[in-house]
Image (cartoon, coloured by chain):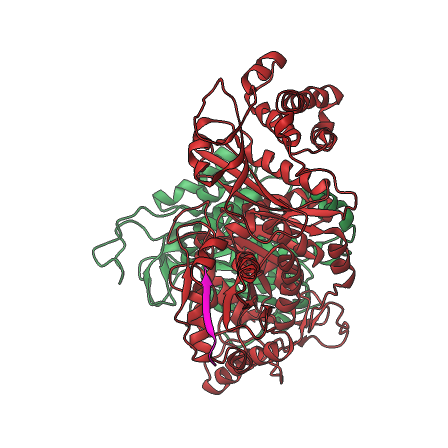
Chain colours: A green, B red
Amino acid sequence: MASIQDFSGYQPTWCPGCGNWGIGMAIKKALVELNYSPDQVVVVFGIGCSGNMNDFLNAYGLHSLHGRALPNAIGIKLANHKLPVLAVVGDGDCYGEGGNHFIHACRGNHDITVIVHDNRVYGLTTGQSAPTAPKGYRSKSTPLGLIEAPVNPLALALTSGATFVAQGFAGDLNHLVLILKEAITHKGFSLVNVLQPCVTFNKVNTYQYYLQRVYKLEKDYQKDNFKLALEKAFEVNEEKFPLGVIYQVKRPCYHESLPQISSLPLVEKKRFLEYDSLIKEFI
Amino acid sequence: MTFTWKIGGEAGFGIMTTGLLFSKIASRLGYYILDYVEYPSLVRGGHNAYEVCVSDKEVTALKKDIDVLVCLNEETFYKHKNRLTSQSLVLYDKEEFDFNDNFKKVDVPFKKILTDLKGQTVMKNTIALGASISILGGKIEVLLDLIAEQFKKKGDEIVRFNQQFAIAGYEEVKKNYSFLIKNFLIEKEEKKEKLVVSGNEAFSLGAVLADCRLYAAYPMTPSSSVLHTLASWQEKTGIIVRHAEDEIAVINTALGASFAGVRAAVGTSGGGFSLMVESLSFAGVAEIPVVVFLAQRPGPATGMPTWTEQGDLLFAVFSGHGEFPKIVLAPGDQKEMIKLTLKAFNLADIYQTPVIVVSDMYLSEGHKSVERDWVDKIVREYQIRRGKINLSYKENSQKLEIFLRYKITEDGISEKILPGTPGYFYQENSYEHLEDGHTTEDFKERTKQVDKRNRKIGAYLSQNFQLPNFYGQSDASIIFISWGSTKGAVLLAQKELEKKGIKTGFYHFNHIYPLDKEKVSKLLKKDNKRYLLVENNALGQFGKILAMETGLDFEEKILRYDGRPITVEEIIEKI
């Protein structure tokens, strides 16, 4: 059985106290507890402080472009659906640059787990406002205050057809591990939006800020109630942050709907050789 | 004997299907064809036309005169009458319009037949095909067979209902115009089985033969029929086709699949390719094989979606930021498309880098005859070469080990094992990286990896690059240079010039970039020969590449950039 150590790559370069440490550790713990070892998992990384986890997490990794991790993850899953596929991405990465991919990955119910580091700023490029930053947020790119309304990741996922929508907090590692394990085991598209303080650039959404406003969903919370999930998703407008799986339903995932790969993964199939039947179409 | 049959009518009334059926009829009767479609970027309301050039020998280019013009509406006649001669036959319905010009009239009562047989407007096409076969001396049975194949799923009654329109058109002409009947389509005694394939279909066939297992695309004219063809083959061949949300998702889906070990390709036109190029650069640095099918149309921007141009060559060659190896191939016709597509997938795997197969609307959507035995031979001889992509790397049951995915090698190519191989792990990285894939900014390591990747260019040039094909007389003093789909027009121009006693030579490039500078310079050394560059663009883009690589500047150019393919006549005119 693999250990946390086996999953640990190079020494992380994140700022001391950054929420990424918690998320990074939670991912490793979840994988260990699910009995995976680094050679059995594929992780696609976006670009940002979150994506820099590529060097700190041992796995078959693909460090993608900014915004493009999701279509890469989809392609990997289509080619070899036996492998669990995770995407480690940031808020700007996934909801800004890659926003279109996010919507369509939800729609397709592609069996990938998307772990979004939501710190409401662009950390790696020194603190500009992210799509999840609140209206009026002042940053280097919005010195007069952000004009746009924020993206609501949970509501966007829900209304786009995601079959698993969850929210975690980088400051509650054990709870995050539980959520991640459920997300990775879920058959279909799973979103884990992780609230994460950026200790260097975000002086508003700090650990203290979140600690006062997060709460865990009750044990008897109805995960399959879409309307209730939407209500939970919109609590962010009142600065309340539910933690846990806010929505989960069963629906066939994309690769399960492809008869071509019903018996073997695409990469393991025998080569197609009956060309005659194709050639006849042109006679 | 070579003749041109052309049909025109309002868009949305089945002209495309009808044209293709005519090509198949001629092919089944033993002839060679080349066809060409003209249509506006509209679903309804514009003018559609389809012409088929038929001959008993290979047809490489369209001819100027139209021998048979089928007018499904009046507009067709006026749009194309400038290409008619006094010997041309015009099939039309007198009830709809009439004309006084000196062409041979064949009045086909489309309207009356439709009313008599209670047919829908679209069945005019079937009447037209029956009438065309009749006036050309062909066998109606071939058309009846094709109709039966087309409608067999709908039952015998529907088949017979449709066939009667063909028969009516056929009999009508036979009865009233026996004095005009030609012997152009008399069934050949010796027939070679031939395929009627478009450039896009040739790419699709090549992709499946090359074991491409994932194709992603977003619809874009003129590349879309690759998406349709491969999508329709999914259940049969097992290929997965993903119509993604945009071209960025398209190429990244393919890169993901390729990372996971399957051959993957994407297809698009200039606009979609523009969206892909950042990811092309990702493929370059992360060393992920991918085949990109680029079917050009006139740009810039939305341009003229349904017309042809070779305007994206320089863009393809220089696509993607940063410096990385990529291979650009440009087939000259449907056969070359099959061959080079097969090769493209091998090259992408061997060099672990993007390979771009460049087409254009003229090649992509036009059909040409390809002999069945030629295809069978290609299929038999093709070998899948995946280079250093190791599908069955031995498992490691000892301690977990990081695999050196970017190991420095002499030829610049590193071994790749499949993600999921037990006992190992590695990453492929869009950042500059060390041999183990870890991100680096170290100047020495950076230089090593850049050099490693660029060494692949040398390996490609020495092992897989091919010099241009030469056609014509080696002692000729007039030499044409062209690339891609302009091949056929130059070949026919050469024949016509030869008839006039003018000797010419022709270098046709299909391995476009990178080029072997020394070999190409040697070949095109300017003695006292007159060189003419033939391109379907405004700037002579391939000429610029030759100048950049060899220092040779070709001043005489035959260029066309009005959206139409270069014709034989305009080449001859310049000599």
Measured as percent of width and height from the top left, residue B412 is found at: 60, 80
Q: State left or right for residue B404 relative to residue B479.
A: right
Q: Which residues are magenta?
A: B527-535
For the residue pair B457 and B178, the one nearer the viewer reads as: B178
> Is the residue B188 above or below the residue B61 in the image?
above
Left or right relative to A280: residue A52? left
Residue B326 at x, y percent in the picture: 53, 70
Main SS of residues in magenta: strand
Q: Identify which residue, B414 or B505, lies in the foreground.
A: B505
Q: Horizontally, is B552 left or right of A250 in the view?
A: left
x and y percentages locating residue B446 in the rendered image:
48, 82
- B192 inside magenta stretch: no
Q: Nearer the viewer, residue B166 or A70?
A: B166
Q: Residue furthest top?
A: B116
Image point (64%, 40%), residue name? B23
Query: Is A269 on the left or on the right of A184, as rendered?
Result: right
Find out whether residue B531 is within the magenta segment: yes
Farthest-out residue, left:
A144
Q: Examine the rendering and report whether any part of residue A163 can be seen.
A: no
* Image quadrant in which the C terminus of chain B is located: bottom left
Q: Position of residue B273 (x, y in %)?
A: 47, 56
